[in-house]
Structures are given as structure tokens and as C-alpha cells.
Amino acid sequence: MDIPLDENLCLKLYEQMLTIRMFEEKAIELFEHNFIRGNVHPCIGQEAVSVGVCFNLHREDYMINTHRGHGNCIAKGADLKWMMAELLGKSTGYCKGKGGSMHIADFEGGNLGANGIVGGGIPIAVGAGISIQNRGTDQVVACFFGDGATNQGTFHESLNLASLWKLPVIFVCENNLYALSTPLKESISTPRISDRAVAYGIPGMNIDGNDVIGVYVKTKEAVERAKAGEGPTLLDCITYRFFGHFTGDPGRGTTYRSKEEMDQWLSRCPINTFRTQLLQEKIMTEEMDQTIEGNVKTSIEEAIRFAKESPSPSPEEATQDLFY
Amino acid sequence: MATTVIMPKLGLTMTEGTIEKWLKQEGDHVQKGEPLVEIITEKINFQYESPASGILRKILHHEGEVVPVTVPIAIIAEEGEAVEEVEMARPEAPAEIPLPAAVPRESKEPSQRIFASPIARKMAQEKGLDLSSIKGSGPTGRIIKMDVLKATEKGAAPPIQRPSEKLIPLKGIRRIIAKRMTESFQNIPHFYLSLEIDMTSCLALYEQLREEVERRTKLRFTLTDILVKVTASALKDQPIINSRIEGDQIHLIEEINIGVAIALEDGLIVPVIHHADQKSLIEIASTLRGLTQKAKEGKLSLEEVGGGTFTLSNMGMLGIDKFNPIINPPECSILGVGRTVEKPVFHGGEIKVRPMAWFSLSSDHRIVDGATASLFLNHIKKLVENPPLLLL
Amino acid sequence: MERDPSLMLIGEDIGRYGGIFGVTKGLLEEFGPHRVRSTPISESAIIGSALGAAMTGIRTVAEIMYVDFTTCAMDQIVNQVAKMRYMSGGKAKIPMVIRTQGGGGRGNAAQHSQSLEALFLHIPGLKVVMPSTPYDARGLLKTAIRDDNPVMFIEHKLLYATKGPVPDGEYLIPFGQSDIKRKGRDVTIAAISYMVMKALKASERLAGEGIEAEVIDLRTLVPLDLETILQSVRKTNRVVVVHEGCRRNGIGAEISSLIQEEGFDFLDAPVERVGSLNVPIPYTESLEKAVIPDEEDIISAVKKVLYRT
């Protein structure tokens, strides 16, 4: 397989996907041990999309994501300690414990926030695009959402407006084929989500979301279009989640997905396939793999330790941060 | 390295789960990710996967058990690896400040209701006018501002002397006592038994031991100390009294922990002498003196007021002859002791003057009946009137 | 627009058309299409993109043509705009105004005549402003635009035609400051938006019967100036709250609750609320008149609290 990329970049892509995978596994464990409240929506299996897209973004580019956003946040450069602290509701978290898993935002890193409303962040991304256009800068906006969100009114209003005004937005659909338990064929009226781009006069690309290199390359094209003032692109990245919709979905989502389907996708795990490729192409050795894995493990354990040792916010903080 | 498997939190609102079926038995090999146990919560059946590989060394909770989230349910370890007994955390019963005798409630007659607007009331009060002497022209006879103004002009009824009212807010220990007392009195079907007991031998024992005890402990020795020992012994004999109701079961408690009611300035507190049956008189005396001191300084810890299985309330020193104490929940009974009074009694065919005291036992009729409680109270009488029996 | 070169307007028909009430006339020509953006009919996108732009450095005024249409963008207003700053632990700054207009009386019928301020009052994170005079509108709008927080600026369609003195120079009216539009001793009337006008007219008629009403124009509902109302109540001992929204759970419910909590001892009568009947606004004039409060309703309410019925 011909990997048209720099070796170093490949190793970074691999490390980042591994970081996301291990972070999510630990988050699930912490949830089961009652350290995390509410719910966690793991993106296990979808790592290649976040990483492939975000590696095309600079720190000052904007990104908006969803309830399944830990992977997007990490790929955009979030600090694991502050993310973990936010999950544990501590005052050292990104949102001082006020947002939680579904609302993590890192404004300095360009992350305008995860959103708990499906499709809620898409118009906001459009707004960021307008801001870039008005200020005349070279930034772009990556807007992540799922297959379910493409049925929300906001998806259609936003794509229309962004196309009309040629805003520098890359609309990335993390299409894991299910909106909770509803499969694509029971919710999308066109054969593919990428078909919807036609309605708004923008290019729609249907991509193998588990091929991190493929995602990376296609996103690069979309970013170039955006910067050239040619407007938005819709990237329909086909992927799969290996866990249930959230921690609370019995049997890891196998009440509505068949074991055969799951097994098939497991065999196409983005991390495993990329690892195999890198080993085959001699870009990575077994030793390097162990080192990377060890490093990732360490940084996650550090993050957990930091989070556990951090203080909880005091009750007085409940009424702060409402108005500026 | 051993892995403790806990009852996992599998959903937003889950607080406990039922172990439906262990898919592996003790001694079996398990692989990480292999289904280990079926858990039911809110009618949903989860197959929980093993978080580690190894041997399922110990199953801590069995099929059918309901286990709160994060409590350990099993241990996985390597063959031959040492496995420490995992402390099965049971939530501590919250420390309660237990209470004694009830104050009889007075019922008040509802007074005639006067309707007046807030400003009318305020003005009447300021002018010292009696609202009941003012006719209200508002709806439902409401006295309004205008009516008070008119009454002022006319020179209405002379100012009434209102008795000054002092209001004490119900807070702190008083509030807790109020709540607990109400709870106990309302929920527990109390019944009361009383016996007058001849204190001669008991007082003699007290005199005999006092010097020695006070010499050894450098603390005061009291009659209450002996009564604690007596009660502990009686409880050993009648374990049903040393129990509590839990749902629809009676839980017989192994430990005999006797609470002793102590009057403080702002309320009652009942520190507990743990394992009173295993303590000598000297140990009881020094423990109780220590607890009393701490109580007076407000320094009792949660452990020192918790875990009681029976309460003793001695109101003799307050000059009370006889009283029916209120049970200290969740205990089964409480013993109230009155003052010792020299009385003429029939003793061996003659009238003699003996020191007598009333012992009153209040009990929970859900747990014991009159006969059982009588046996207990009579046993106490036997021990008090014949203390050497305590040596047996 | 001149003072802040980044200030952007976004809404439907606000460019060439100048807005349906002419509020933005001439602005497109002067400031160009990046700063005066006319959109398709996409309320969610309007509010959402105003939020996104405000969060990333562009102070924005979004226009929703009728307050009735804010319901099409409720998720963006309630779940996004109002909560973004709080959820991010105070990191987001949202310098944004949502301008809209409401109210009936022109036969626009049920879906174009509502007064929905009570909904926004209930959502923490939004400031709510409703001016009643040209003077107040200018001063309050300037404050709203300069505020770095989300402001619901709700105008009234019948007030666009009113005229009043407006000084040329710069002036700002702070939020949380009501205005006593008429002084009086016998009764306090607390009103908002167009109802202030009706309350003033009612007061003139009441004066003819020897009743001097004090009319307080609340101007901002969040933050609310309760103290001015309380001061007035201490003087008059009776209050009537007047609003155009439905009486049931209208802003009068909250305000009367606050008054009885803080001013209980001074009340000679229960607080009276005057609001629209609990029905949608009907089309025919006679029916519309029956539903929306008028001077008669205000006068009756005043007499009730004076026990003069």
C-alpha cells in the first residue's frame, strides 16, 4: 500500500488514535466505578475520522463536535489531564466541572465545544465561518456530527447558508451507520449521506472512515477548497462504533446490531489495520509500537491521577460564570 | 496482579444491580473481555465482560443478591496468588442522636380567625389597636388600611396588652430531638411495664466496691455503672430484646452496646458503651465517665453515639419517681430508672423500710410481647436484688 | 455600526429591503454585505451562526422577524446561546443581541401577534429587554449591543410608529433600572412594552376620578429592578402588574411573587395581574380587543385593589 505521507506524521497519527482508544477505555472503566456521572458516549472504533481530519487543522482553526466528542477533542490537541478532570467534574477541568463529557470546550485550542444537542453545533460552526470571512483570516472550521444529525433542520439550514456564502467550513459526518439504534436505511432518504451535498451545491465525498490516511488526504482537499474561498465540503466518513451508543446501552449495542456485522467491522479496526500497515511498510517496529503504547498508557494514567487528585468545585461556584 | 471485579455502573441512573447468573465458577479460567456474569438492572439484562484475564478466585456475591454499584463482587487473580479478603463495604447507618422521654403535647383551641391585609395588621400593631374591634370592609370581612385609618380617627378600642412572646427556633440538637422523638413515637407501637425493685443489695454492692473502683480508676463510681452491667447480663439472657426491626425481619444483634442517656444543657445525648457485656465494672465506669465528660464538652464522635442496641435512662438523680421513656430507634426497648426512695414494704412477713426504685421498660410490640418483656424486666429485678448472680 | 467596525447584523430581509419595519434601512449600502447579512428563512442557522460569530470575535445583532419565530430556533436560543458561557466554565464570551418584535392589535392573528417574554425570563443566561419609548429604545439598544452577554431585545410592532424626543448625543441606559413614567400616590402600576402606553392612558382617566396612579416602566425583565416597585408599594400599598403576554404564567406571575415575598407587610390587597386571556390571539378586531388588555382592564384592576368596585 502506497502511503503518500511523511513517516513521522504516520507515527503521530497512530499514536493519537491509540491515545483516543485508551482514553475512551479508561473513561468507560471510570464510569463503571462511578467516578463519572451522567453518561459517556465512547467513540471507540471511530478514531481514524477525528485524527485524519484534525491533523489538517492548525491550533487557531476552529472545531465543533458532538456528545461523542472525546476523540475530536483529543485529536484537536486537548490536554488529557484537563479533559479527564472535566469528566470527573473537578474544578481543574476544561469547563471547571460545569460542562462534563458532552460540553468539553477548549477555546484557546480552537475547540468551540462539544454539543449535547444533535445538530446543535452545526449552525455555530457556520457562525465561526462567517467570523473568519469577515475578519479575512486564513482559518477554517471543522464541524463534526453524526449520521443522525443530518436529519435535523439545522444540518440543512447550515449547509445551505455556508454554501450560499462560500464559508470556509468542512462538514464532517462521522457516519457510524446508526443513530442510537436506528440504522441508516431507516432514516436517510437518499442512498448515501454524501448525496445530500448535491442539494446545497457543494462537493460530497463518501470516504472509508477507518482509513486514517484516506481521511487525512480527503480532508486536505477540503481545507484547500475552503481556504481558496470555494466554500464548504461535506465529508461522509463511513465508520463503526465498537461500543454501545453510550454506557447504558446493553450488550454494547448488540440488541440492534448483529454479531456478524460487529465482527466484520472489528476486523477492520482502524488502529489494528494501520498498525499492520506501518509494521509491514517498516515505518514502525514492534519495539517502537511497545514504546508508543507505553507512553500513551503513562500519559493517560497521569491524567487520571491528576483528575482524581484535583479538587471539586465549591457550591458557591454554581452561580458563577453565567454572565460576563 | 489481582483484579477486584465490582458491580459496574452500567447506566445513568443505576444505583444497584442484581446478580442474575455467574457464567463462570470459582476456579475457572477467564479471559479479559469474556462474558463473566449476567446482571439485571431495571429489567435490562447485561452480560458484563471480565475486566481481566486469570482465574476467578473468589465470588463475593451470589446469584439473586442485590449489590450496590462499585461494591466488589469477585476477585480474579493468578493461580496461587495471595488474595486478601476484600472488605465488603456496607454503608454505615447514619449516626443518630437518640432520645428519651416525651413531653406531653398540649392541644390548643383554634382561635377565631381575623382577616386583615398585611398593611392593616402592621398599622394596627403600630397604633396599638385591637384588630378584633375593627370592622373589615374588604371581601370576606377583610380589614383593610382604610378601616384601620377610620378606627384611628374614631379613637378605637384601647390598646391591648399583648403578652410578650418569646420565640425559640427549633434548630440544632433540639430540632434533631424533635424529629427523632416524633418518628419513634409515631412509628413504634410502645407498651410499658413497670416494677418496683428493692435496691438494698445493689446499694450495698455499690458501697462495697466504691472505694476500690475509685482508687483504681481515679474516677467516680456510680450506681448507673452497676445498672449497665445488670442490663448487659439480662440482655445476654434474653437476646430478643437486643434486636431491631429491619423491614419485615427481626435482626438479633450479637453485640451488646448499651447507650446511657445524659442530660446536657440544650438537650439529651446518648453515648454508647460498646460490648458492655464483655466489660468489667471498672471498665464500664471509666468508659462511661469518659463519655460523659466528652458529652459535656460536645466532643463525642459518631462512633461513640452510634451502634447502640439498648438504652438506659436513669432519672433518679433528677428526682423522678417513675416515667415511661420513649424508645430510641431502631432499638427494641429502653429502661427508665427512677429515684431510690426509702419506703415501708412487706418483707419476710414484716413491714420494713427498704430503699425502693421504679424500673420501667418501654418495648416495641412488633418485636416482643408482654410476657417476654416481663421476663426480661423480672430478670433485671433478680439481678439487682441479688447482685452476686452477676458472677455466674 | 460605526463605533465597532466588526459589528455584524444578520437576519431575514434586513439588507436591501431594510427590514420589514425599516429598522435597518440604508445599512447595507453603508456597511456592505459582510456586515449586513440577509439570510434565507433559517431561524436556527441565524441564531446559531450569530452565536458562532460572537464566540469567535464578531459582535453580532441577529434579527428574528417576529418573536413567534423564535420558537423555530428554540434549541439554539435555549440550549446553545443561553448556556454556552456557563457550560464552558466561563470561557466563552458571547457579545450578541437577538432583536425581535411581538405584540398584537393589528389583526396579524395567532402566529404573528404573541408576547413570549415569559419564556425567555425562565431561561438563565439570557437578559431580557423591552423598551416602550424611542428614548428608551435607543439607550437600551446601545447598552445591549455593548453588553458582552446574550440579550433578547424585544420590540413591539405598535411602537414602531410612535414618536418621542431622542437626544442627539451619546447616552446609555443601564439594565436593571426601571423608569417611573408617572408619579402617583394611590396605586402602583408596573408595566412593560406597549402596555406602558396603555397604563399611562388609563392613569389619565383614573386621575379624573381622583385616583393618582404611579406608572413604572420596567424596561428590563432580566435583570429586574424590583426595588423601585417595592419603594412605590411602600407608598401606595397596592400594585397592578400589566403585560400583554397571557395572564397564565406571564411575567406578572414572577413579579407578583417577588412583591409579596419582599413587600408583604405593605400590601393592602393581593397583587393584581393584567394580561391577555389564555387563548391564542384571534383575527377579528372585536375578538382581538377582547383578548388583549386595554385601558378598561387596567382601570378595573386598579379599582379592585382600591376596593372601589
Image (cartoon, coloured by chain):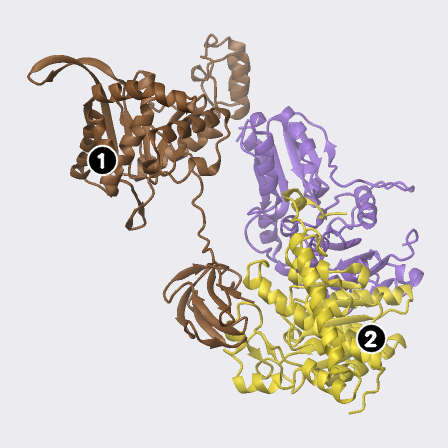
Chain colours: A yellow, B brown, C purple
Q: Nearer the viewer, residue B183 or A79?
A: A79
Residue A26: x %, y % from top left: 62, 66
Look at discs 1 and 2 and give the one toward the viewer: 1
| Disc 1 and disc 2 in contact, CB within 8 angstroms | no
Quarter of image, res A128: bottom right
Q: Residue at x 44, y 33 (%)?
A: B176
Asked if residue B23 shows in the view, the reply is yes
Q: Residue at x 66, y 25 (%)?
A: C185
Asked if residue B48 shows in the view, the reply is no
How many neighbours does mark 1 have within 10 angstroms: few (below 14), some (14-19), or many (20 or more)? few
* Extreme-left residue of the structure: B349
Q: Nearer the viewer, residue B232 or A279?
A: B232
Residue B339: x %, y % from top left: 27, 18
Instruction: Report the disc number at residue A56.
Output: 2
Say what secondary structure mark 2 lies in.
loop
| Residue B224 relative to residue A189: left or right | left
Compared to C211, does B160 lie above or below?
above
| Residue B330 relative to residue A122: left or right | left
Compared to B146, does A95 lie above or below?
below
Three-letter amino acid code at the position of disc 2: Asn
- Name the residue beneath numbered marker 1: B392
Measure how far apart labels 1 and 2 are at the Cα level: 88 Å
| Residue A312 relative to residue B105: left or right | right
Three-letter amino acid code at the position of disc 1: Leu
Q: Residue at x 70, y 52 (%)?
A: A96
Q: Chain of mark 1?
A: B
How many neighbours does mark 2 have within 10 angstroms: few (below 14), some (14-19), or many (20 or more)? many
* Extreme-bottom residue of the structure: A1
User: Which quadrant of the rendered structure holds the N terminus of chain C?
Assistant: bottom right
| Residue C214 relative to residue B261: left or right | right
Quarter of image, res A17: bottom right
| Badges 1 and 2, same chain | no
